[in-house]
Each structure stands twice: as structure tokens, then as C-alpha cells.
Image (cartoon, grey):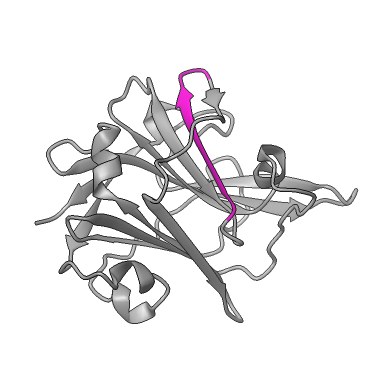
């Protein structure tokens, strides 16, 4: 499995408020090897970074794209699913029974749900209240989606084993078609080796290693 090493930082009450500051991420490893195995078009650069401090896991997606599509008809599941977004999936084992999904659009609308094999999704399930915080920003060349997740909530869901979190890292990029509708390009850190796009499969996960 692919591995990404997450560096540890000193605990500080202000850490969660710094997740949009570039200097906060100076110690973080930069993950950039994203591909779209089902599409031959070039993938615009994505930089993913993560850190942790014993209390929280911090993540930051910087996506070098200014042509962002957000479906704004409402805040429903369908609306978020029809929007550009970044995604993190967490599992306790390769049985995927269950696993947990966070899908976040550039305005920080969050679709969090529990999932089980064969794409059985429980949209009534929610991450523990106050255990996840999100922020976003835009500049002239990119958008950023960042967040903090409590280590306590990850442990409560049995997602940390020997300082390893088995994680999928993804992006959905919506592209306008000739008819005016938008269709997604699916982008992933780990190629699941499937004929059709599918993130909801054990082979699309890698390992996040929490360094001491």
C-alpha cells in the first residue's frame, strides 16, 4: 500500500486556527501524486498536506484550479455530490464494514456519512459534533480546503492502529460539457485498478503513518 508520513507538531490551542496559513504546513510532507486512471486529460496539480499533535489530525488540500463548479440549488446530498470537492475516506480494515467518508466542497459544505460494502451509504450518520472543523480560501491560482479532526473521534471509530490510519484521498472535478451539463472527472491518490471509477473499494486506500 502507498504510504504518506504525517509529521508531529507541538500541541497548541491555536493550531486549529492556523490551518489556512502556509507557514503552519512547513513541516508537512507534500503529497502530489494524484491521477485520474479513467481519463486521459492532464490532472491539475493538487497538493495535500497533513500534520498531527496528539490531540488533532490536520489536513490541507490546495487545488490549482480556478474554474470551480459548485451546485448552489440547496445544501442537499445531491447538491454537494454535483459539486467540485475533495474527499477523505477512513477505514478500520479492508473489509470496509464500515468505513467513513468526508466529502467537502470549496465552500466547506460537508457531506459526512458512514458507508458499507457495495455502496451502502448512511447519510443520517454524522461525524461527532465539534470534532471536525473546516476552513477554505481562494487565491488567483488555486483553492484550499483544510480541516482538523480530533484524534479522539478517530480512535472512537477504531480508525487508528499502531499509528496508522488507512485512508483514501480523492478529488471530484466537474467539467462543463457541450450540452451545458457538468460531468465529473475522478481523481485519486491510489489507483484502485478498476475499469470504471470507484473509490468505494478496498484497493483505493493507502496508509497514513503518524510519526512520533
Q: Outermost residue, front direction?
A: 129
The verdict on residue 144 being magenta is: no
- The answer to whether 37 appears left or right of 206 in the picture is right
Q: Is residue 120 above or below residue 153?
A: above
Residue at 28% in and 41% down: 154
Could you tell me which quadrant the N terminus lies in? top left
Q: Quadrant of residue 164?
A: top left
Q: Outermost residue, left direction?
A: 212
Residue 54, how many percent across, how many down? 17, 55
Residue 182, how many percent across, how many down? 78, 49
Q: Is residue 46 visible?
A: no
Q: Quadrant of residue 184?
A: top right
Residue closest to the eye, 165 or 180: 165
Q: Is residue 86 visible?
A: yes
Question: How many circles with numbers are drawn on the protein?
Answer: 0
Could you tell me which quadrant the C terminus lies in? bottom left
Residue at 22% in and 57% down: 6
Q: Quadrant of residue 51?
A: bottom left
- The answer to whether 58 appears left or right of 145 in the picture is left
- The answer to whether 83 appears left or right of 47 in the picture is right
Residue at 21% in and 70% down: 12
Main SS category, magenta section: strand
- The answer to whether 127 appears left or right of 110 in the picture is left
Residue at 54% in and 20% down: 120
Residue 41, how many percent across, how many down? 63, 54
Magenta segment:
109-118
Residue 97, how many percent across, how many down? 37, 20
Q: Outermost residue, right direction?
A: 179
Amino acid at each position: 500500500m502507498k504510504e504518506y508520513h504525517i509529521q508531529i507538531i507541538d500541541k497548541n490551542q491555536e493550531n486549529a486556527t492556523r490551518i489556512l496559513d502556509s507557514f503552519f504546513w512547513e513541516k508537512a510532507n507534500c503529497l502530489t501524486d494524484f491521477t485520474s486512471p479513467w481519463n486521459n486529460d492532464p490532472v491539475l496539480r493538487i497538493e495535500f498536506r497533513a500534520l498531527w499533535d496528539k490531540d488533532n489530525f490536520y489536513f490541507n488540500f490546495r487545488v490549482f484550479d480556478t474554474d470551480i463548479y459548485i451546485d448552489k440549488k440547496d445544501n442537499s446530498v445531491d447538491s454537494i455530490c454535483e459539486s467540485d470537492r475533495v474527499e477523505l475516506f477512513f477505514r478500520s480494515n479492508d473489509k470496509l464494514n464500515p468505513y467513513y467518508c468526508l466529502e467537502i466542497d470549496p465552500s466547506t459544505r460537508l457531506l459526512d456519512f458512514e458507508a458499507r460494502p457495495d455502496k451502502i451509504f448512511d447519510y443520517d450518520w454524522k461525524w461527532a459534533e465539534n470534532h471536525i472543523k473546516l476552513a477554505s480560501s481562494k487565491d488567483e491560482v488555486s483553492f484550499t480546503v483544510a480541516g482538523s479532526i480530533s484524534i479522539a473521534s478517530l480512535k472512537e471509530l477504531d480508525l487508528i492502529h499502531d499509528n496508522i490510519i488507512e485512508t483514501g484521498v480523492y478529488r471530484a472535478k466537474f467539467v462543463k460539457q457541450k450540452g451545458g451539463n457538468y460531468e465529473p472527472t475522478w481523481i485519486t491518490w491510489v489507483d484502485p485498478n478498476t475499469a470504471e471509477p470507484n473509490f468505494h473499494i478496498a484497493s483505493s486506500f493507502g496508509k497514513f503513518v503518524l510519526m512520533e
